[in-house]
Image (cartoon, coloured by chain):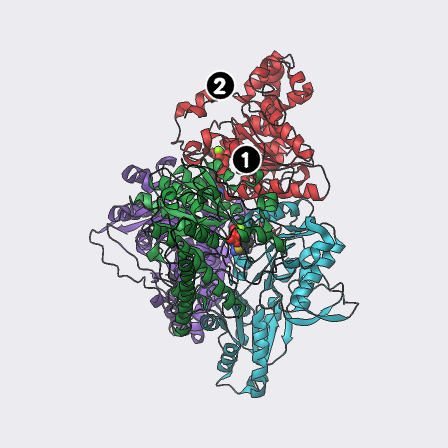
Chain colours: A red, B green, C purple, D cyan
Amino acid sequence: MADQRPQGKTNAAGGRSPKAGGRKAKAAKLVETTGLRPDELIGLLQRMMLIREFEEECARLYRAGRIRGVTHTYQGQEAVAVGVCSTLNVSDFITSTHRGHAHVIAKGGDVNLMMAELLGKATGYCKGRGGSMHIADMSQGILGANGIVGGGMGIAVGAALSSKMLGRDTVAVCFFGDGAMNQGILHEVSNIAACWNLPVVFLCENNFYGMSASVEDTLACKEMNLAGRAAAYDIPAATCDGMDVIDVHLATRAAVERARGGGGPSYVVCTTYRFLGHHVGDPLTYRDKSAVDPWRLRDPIPNFAGRLVADNLATREQVDRWEAEAKDAIARALAFAEESPDPDPSNLTEDVFA
Amino acid sequence: MADQRPQGKTNAAGGRSPKAGGRKAKAAKLVETTGLRPDELIGLLQRMMLIREFEEECARLYRAGRIRGVTHTYQGQEAVAVGVCSTLNVSDFITSTHRGHAHVIAKGGDVNLMMAELLGKATGYCKGRGGSMHIADMSQGILGANGIVGGGMGIAVGAALSSKMLGRDTVAVCFFGDGAMNQGILHEVSNIAACWNLPVVFLCENNFYGMSASVEDTLACKEMNLAGRAAAYDIPAATCDGMDVIDVHLATRAAVERARGGGGPSYVVCTTYRFLGHHVGDPLTYRDKSAVDPWRLRDPIPNFAGRLVADNLATREQVDRWEAEAKDAIARALAFAEESPDPDPSNLTEDVFA
Amino acid sequence: MNAVSNDGSGGASPPATGGTVTMTYVQALNEALREEMERDPTVFVMGEDIAVWGGGGVFGVTKGLVDIFGPERIRDTPISEAGFTGVGLGAALTGMRPVVEYMYADFMMVAMDQIANQAAKIRYMFGGKARVPLVLRTQEGAGRGNGPQHSQSLEAWFTHIPGLKVAVPSTPADAKGLLKMAIRDDNPVVFLEHKLLYGKKGEVPVGEHLVPFGRANVLREGRHVTVVGVHITNDHALEAAEILAPEGIELEVVDPRTLVPYDREAVAASVRKTGRLIAVHQAPERVGVAAEIIQCAIEDAFDYLDAPPMRLCAANMPVPYAKTLEDADLPQVADIVGAARRLMSGRSVTTAGSR
Amino acid sequence: MNAVSNDGSGGASPPATGGTVTMTYVQALNEALREEMERDPTVFVMGEDIAVWGGGGVFGVTKGLVDIFGPERIRDTPISEAGFTGVGLGAALTGMRPVVEYMYADFMMVAMDQIANQAAKIRYMFGGKARVPLVLRTQEGAGRGNGPQHSQSLEAWFTHIPGLKVAVPSTPADAKGLLKMAIRDDNPVVFLEHKLLYGKKGEVPVGEHLVPFGRANVLREGRHVTVVGVHITNDHALEAAEILAPEGIELEVVDPRTLVPYDREAVAASVRKTGRLIAVHQAPERVGVAAEIIQCAIEDAFDYLDAPPMRLCAANMPVPYAKTLEDADLPQVADIVGAARRLMSGRSVTTAGSR
Ligand SMILES: Cc1ncc(C[n+]2csc(CCOP(=O)(O)OP(=O)(O)O)c2C)c(N)n1
Ligand SMILES: Cc1ncc(C[n+]2csc(CCOP(=O)(O)OP(=O)(O)O)c2C)c(N)n1
Ligand SMILES: [Mg+2]
Ligand SMILES: [Mg+2]
């Protein structure tokens, strides 16, 4: 269990200095280290806050019986979605997972439309047809969350193939979890992406569990180095601190730049943790109650807020205001969703075929 | 294409000396090097001869329109099937592929029953129900050829799981080709075998092509080192000379011993070549006609016969007689098959359920 | 579907000796697993989140079993359905009797080759020289807002592929008796539970209780319309029968319990009596099991039919998430009521009933 | 099956301008691919052994195309069906129009999640906000001794899963016209060729020739028995018609050409005329497409039926290897002849024919 304690270390990949990310960067000027503008850095924090508030509301709604099926929230992992998607353009693609709300928000999705979808409304992203696990936004390059573990991996590589065949410089990022690493399709499309030198980043969020299955018990790979699997396909890989939005940003940026420059696929593994259960209602019998404590100390939101303050990029008051703004945005999203009509069953079979 | 030239080198694994196999061993006394008795060594040659004659007859029969569907023959690869299966007991298991005749013969299968099956006779291994790609012999631990690339991989690991759960010391060997390496199920069951420390050997026959697809074009992995993929699962691996029955025997023996001793799974990759097409009738447009020439020089049968003679374990006359005996055995198998009745359609649906 | 006599699974059901207890469908399944694992050390269960999660399975089917049998026999797997199906098959071929669990039927899609090309065909391909005592357990069905990839009913696929037996228990007693039977069967059995039935209560025989495959259960007798349901739609049919009874319309509700083998004679006998047939399921209508149920009845009892047989199924669309849509998509009690009335319209009830 | 009007695929077929030429089914497919790839640079083909092997594909469907379009657009893949199906789907979502080839339909089992859970459902799950112009081409069927894992007919599965269109061409002209239509369709189309039809010759319109989906083709008119076949069984039906004609029994042979959308009205119209229906296919009988064809006719034309509709399908078993067994397993011309005679027995032919 030793390796489930939070780590700040970064394995270098693609010419990035191992010192660029992680705790060491705290002391450095963020603007200089990252090359990001202050407003961009602040945007990272705001996005993470928006995700956190969305997920908190989502959990409340689920417990109140207002979201059907199951819903998987993302508290604790926000630095990953935001760090990754902050390296992408609107025209770039992502594929997401069952735990997809954050990826959608980070890639530019609309919280109103997503909230409406969770409540099964006609105005939702999927017009009430899909629900939590199928949110997509073609206009933002969001090729869908997915209810099947590993289900989106081929799609991401296909988007990368399109980019190449159409002569575009777009990149695709394929999000997946540690548990998904054991799905055969990852093996198949990693090999294809490598053989065809496609612009795709395989982005693994290692939160140490796939439901109750620990990485330790179900993932054979040396010292639990998930990124090590990339070597089987001659794909370069990096592991980064998934609790640190800057470390994630930099590691992903290197991989995205490589892809965009014709350098082919990469693996990036972000070490992170989900503060809550697998889905709302998870009895959480498989890990110690206290295991989350050290991770909560590394909560990506207050920590990054602290760095912005330390760097004089923000004041405490601003941070508090942004948090309030995020809450407001989610309240508005909820209001939008609640005011929206239910889908009309009279056009039930619409949308099956184009 | 450089790495498609035959090589005699062996990568060590499991404490085996790299000098144990390959050309270097030619000068050494086979009995001493291998620990095999003279009759066992002679048995290796005889088995290879039996396979060669079986496959030659099979090709003739197919061209004469007497075998239906497609049939995949094994000429050139005999050292692999025989080298591998000579390390196994009757109670050990193998799973095979579309190119399975040799594995069946090497593991102790009956050529009469197999020939009868190829001719679709009621006396055949599958009573005419399966044909060339589905030969199995439960009494010999042969868990079936398979028409689906990768189809038998899980079965092999399941047999290994049985061994472990039932407290038996049996081992399972999973045969597959270089092309099959890209099937997702290999990834899944390699991981499972490693996590559960199961007694299974993943035995890859790298003949450089999966139908027309070359390893070079379709298998991303460094310098075409297929065994390298095993590292992704912390599985030890060896590459050996698939044209040399002794090298194959020793490499597999180490892996089988490790498995039997509780050391878990291994990969063994045998570098080999199929002298003929993918199946009888392959137009062979994807490789140079002359590419086979250097490999023919390394034909495992005359080469190993030569070593036996050089070691004074056999005379030229004996070798010729054994070849004649193999021809005879196949002629008898054909006669048996020809005299056998066609399956009776009146019990058509028999054997669907137990 | 498969003629019962061809399958050799019609073992007798010895009467339960210990009386019955009230329990839920999920408890009945749990008891079946426990009893079979106690009886036979080669039985084990394998799947995702069956041991550690919540004390035993996302739906509680394996609850507490890891404490009794240990993690070797209640074996949590990686998320590798194709892989562990193959492993189960290999274990079944070599001396074990694995029960493989898929969390949702939908996830079986990634393992379809191992199920339909391998497990289903191996015995036949090998000329009858192998036994495949393999149970593939899962839950299917809609009604809980699980959306398009967690709500499918896939019995049509499994029923179509020769070599698989298919069980669809709709009561706690059948859940227990069919699962015990499935585990003792030497053939691959796809054992389909229904997510909405897990909490359903009923009387379940204590101890040894085996429900033979291929024997339908007449859940309610009636003279006017035969309703053949799959899973929860049998409950819908029973509710519809209550509603229709005061109108003088009697439904006969026949639960096939297993789709392979299929008790076509039981359905034919009912149709010969009623002259009317409705087949109901949650799977999409097109090429669903309902068409098969009806076609068998046509082959067996065409001349007895007073009206064209009807089917009530989900629309030809993925299962939607929103409640308004999901409700509209699925066959409901009201649909059965309406269909039965339509079948009876224009005919005197007593005439129809007295044939 | 799906009502035609719901699918929006009923584009008009402009009359061919350049006359016709005689060619084989495989040549017609090849021409369709070539023409569509010339017309639209986003069309490409992806699969195993389609470029280098034998000059273009194991069956020659892509023959010569790599020389014209290069290895990027005639793209040989690793043996990774699940993977490259997903890649095709992703490419379809982002601007390409991929044609994915599976060497044998049986191999699609390893890709089933990508086909049935992803490609089929994505548009619907996304609330109609995505287009999936993806063709999944393969060949299916038995009769060549390819054994249990290389001879299956899987149309029932694809037809059951909502969101997939399903084409089953039985003539060279349809092979061309339907494939061109499939490539232009903005929905996933499972395009099922039949291995025994590749060498079949016929007249094929030169150049632009589009066969709309959901429009059946009456291959032969007749007054007594409607036969609806899939693939090669239509040829069997035509042969049977020849044999029966001298006896005064006229078969009407209706080829649905696509199973989704399905031209139920064409079949119903024929059944209203003949009063008798036989559905034929090589897939196993149980929950096969034949049951669906019959059930649709029952819903549409029950009162016109003079006899119970019949189905002639493979037995409920894997396809056997040996010729004696395979022949016995598959529906043959003689079976159709026999069934038609049985349907007509006890009825005066002229009476039946004059209704
Ligand atoms: C094919 C398939 N198998 C199983 C599941 C059930 N399931 C949903 S999420 C999940 C765990 C995924 O773990 P991981 O990839 O690590 O992602 P995380 O939940 O940790 O974000 C499982 C088993 C599924 N949806 N699809
Ligand atoms: C799932 C699947 N895909 C494709 C095929 C067709 N096929 C049969 S053998 C073969 C090549 C296998 O190559 P390899 O594993 O290297 O074995 P080899 O033929 O070289 O012995 C292919 C593509 C198949 N049988 N199953
Ligand atoms: Mg995880
Ligand atoms: Mg090969």
Up the image or down, C101 lies above or below D276; here it is above
Does label 2 or label 1 sit earlier along the sequence? 1
Q: Is D286 positioned to the left or the right of C55 in the image?
A: right
Residue C160 seen from this side: no
Residue C164, given in percent of the width and then of the height, sits at: 41, 58
Q: Within 8 Å: ligand 1 and the Cβ of disc 1?
A: no
Q: In this view, does C293 lie above or below C138?
A: below
**Which chain hosts label 2?**
A
The label number, if any, that marks residue A230 in the structure image: 1
Give the camera-side residue of A274 and B26: B26
| Rendered position, C166 above or below D264 | above
User: Which structural element holds mark 1?
Assistant: helix
Q: In the picture, which quadrant includes the C terminus of chain C?
A: bottom left
Q: Which of marks 2 and 1 is in front?
A: 1
- CA separation in Å, label 2 and label 1: 31 Å
Element assignment for label 2: helix
Q: What is the x, y in percent for residue D136?
A: 61, 55
Q: Is residue B34 left or right of residue B291?
A: left
State the image coordinates of residue A281 (x, y, percent, origin top left). 43, 34
Please state the chain letter of the residue tagged with numbered disc 1 in the rendered image: A
| Residue type at tag 1 | Ala
The circle on residue C212 is none
Instruction: Residue under label 2, please give it.
Output: A297
